Amino acid sequence: MPNIDLSQTPRRELNSQLHALAPDTNETLWRVENPAGQHALVVGVDAPITVEIAGNVGYYCAGMNQKATVVVEGNAGVGVAENMMSGVVHIKGDASQAAGATAHGGLLIIDGNASARCGISMKGVNIVVKGSIGPMSAFMAQSGALVVLGDAGDALGDSIYEAHLYVRGDVKSLGADCVEKALGEEERAELSGLLKAAGLTGEVQVEEFKYYGSGRSLYNFHVDNALSY
Amino acid sequence: MCGIVGLFLKDRALEPQLGGLLAAMLEVMTDRGPDSAGFAVYGEGQPGRTKLTLRGSNLADLAKTVSDVLGAPVQGVLRDTHVVLSAPSEREAALRTWLAAHRPDITVIGSGQRIELYKEVGLPADVSERFGLAGMSGTHGVGHTRMATESAVTTDGAHPFSTGADQCLVHNGSLSNHRSLRRMLEPRGITFSTDNDSEVAAGYLSWKLREGAGLAQALEDSLSDLDGFFTFVVGTESGFAVLRDPISCKPAVMAETDQYVAFGSEYRALVGLPGIEAARVFEPEPARVYAWERH
């Protein structure tokens, strides 16, 4: 098992080693020590491996991730898993702003809280936050699902497209064109699957969540609103 | 982009290390601000005496000169381009008048019973080294590394800004209504020595504090009067506070233990603090005032 000590090895050396892995590599479990809040750790990995990071990380950790499972045993800075394509990113502490921003696929699990703009412009990623999320989360969210066990801050889902938002706690306010919808069979199945994927089966029930999505009133130009544009 | 740091000690045993810890935090923030750096430290103070931090050149004999002029003992501690004069508080006005008349080349950048401020153009590590930050002790301090956006790379534009006794502010961001705020504050007796937007924020808080608000209330009020992007870290003689704008445009992370409260623009700045592994690390929420007072 490769063990990289970032107090000895430069970050670019770590990322280069990870980029060089073949799809069928046998080095499937990596351990990264002493991250010390450095930025851009384990970015752009494209191999079915697991990378465990022993501590807090800085900005853009696990960005553009494909296939890999990245576990952060601490807090993550701005933009964790931004533009992730597939794989799993698991933050055991809190995440800062813009967690999962623009991500196309995969699963982002945050055990603690996420701050502002969680899931901004998400494009297919699934995000499960076990704590609460900050204001302006899921802004212009296009597809995928955001599950929040705690509360959501102001302007949740502002200008949302077709992402699904499931919140168990209170929502401080909804953004423009984000509305509460009935939790149908399809959404129950999706939510149940995501709770299972995040290891929460039995701990929380699907019925405890409210479901929010697009009111679809911003999709088309309305001449009545012309003066508002 | 700028980097800001702050450290407020709860445990007196750490006070001799304040400067050393702050210097390390400041240096990590070089990536966020290589143009200039500055810091304020709340160190020793004597009742009845006021410390004036002055910036300029030919400062070596200044304390002796003003002692003779004022007929009162004035002590001076010279550190590179700055000197801290300690004068009887009742002679502060006379000292300022004399300086303005006879040494217009000197800038008074801070005053108070305990505060000392230092700032210069250059890399943060060099600035710390020139002023001997690592050797300073104190109860709390703030620091700033600047990447200039709204005004020139000059020492005048370096933070912290101090517009009232024992008050200082560091700012990451930019204010868009600083000209109108300045026009509101100047007739109310708040004076500014630069064109910098952050100095206006400092002046605004000085005005609120003068009008009787506490530090937390002054910051609360600023949320409705300031327009722009900001993360502020503010110091007073006994207080330390943090505020971010309502959309949390600029980054911030904090750590609290039984020994201290620490602020950094990035977590990296906090990594070297004692006991950081067990600290409560959190991101301050937007538009929420965080304030601590010494007891």
Image (spheres, coloured by chain):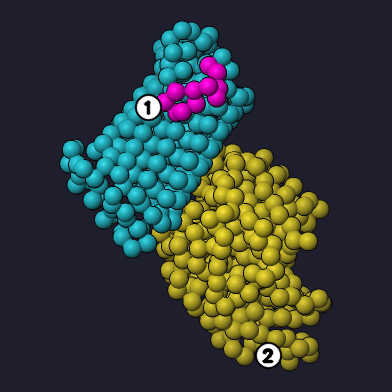
Chain colours: A cyan, B yellow
Label 1: few (<14), some or many (≥20) within 10 Å? many
Return the mark for residue A224: none
Return the mark for residue A125: 1
Residue at the location (50% across, 63% down)?
A: B272
Q: Secondary structure at mark 2?
A: helix
- Badge 2 amino acid: Thr
Tell me, yes or no, if residue B87 can be seen here.
Answer: yes
Tell how many labels: 2
Q: Secondary structure at mark 1?
A: strand
Residue at the location (32% across, 32% down)?
A: A87
Q: Where is residue B178 shown, x and y percent of the image?
A: 59, 49
Asked if residue A205 lies in the magenta stretch, the reply is yes
Tell me, yes or no, if residue B233 can be seen here.
Answer: no
Q: Are marks 1 and 2 on the same chain?
A: no
Asked if residue B60 lies in the magenta stretch, the reply is no
Q: Where is residue B271 shown, x and y percent of the image?
A: 49, 59
Task: State left or right for residue A212 relative to residue A169.
Answer: left
On the image, numbered disc 2 is attached to which residue? B65
Residue at the location (63% across, 84% down)?
A: B77
Q: Is residue A128 above or below residue B95?
A: above
Q: Read off the magenta span.
A: A196-206
> For the residues marked 1 and 2, what is the alpha-carbon distance in whole angstroms?
70 Å
Q: Is residue B35 above or below residue A133?
A: below
Q: Nearer the viewer, residue A91 or B234?
A: A91
Q: Where is residue A143 shown, x and y percent of the image?
A: 38, 21
Q: Nearer the viewer, residue A44 or A87?
A: A87
Chain bearing tag 1 is A
Residue B259 occupies quadrant: bottom right
Q: Nearer the viewer, mark 1 or mark 2?
A: 1
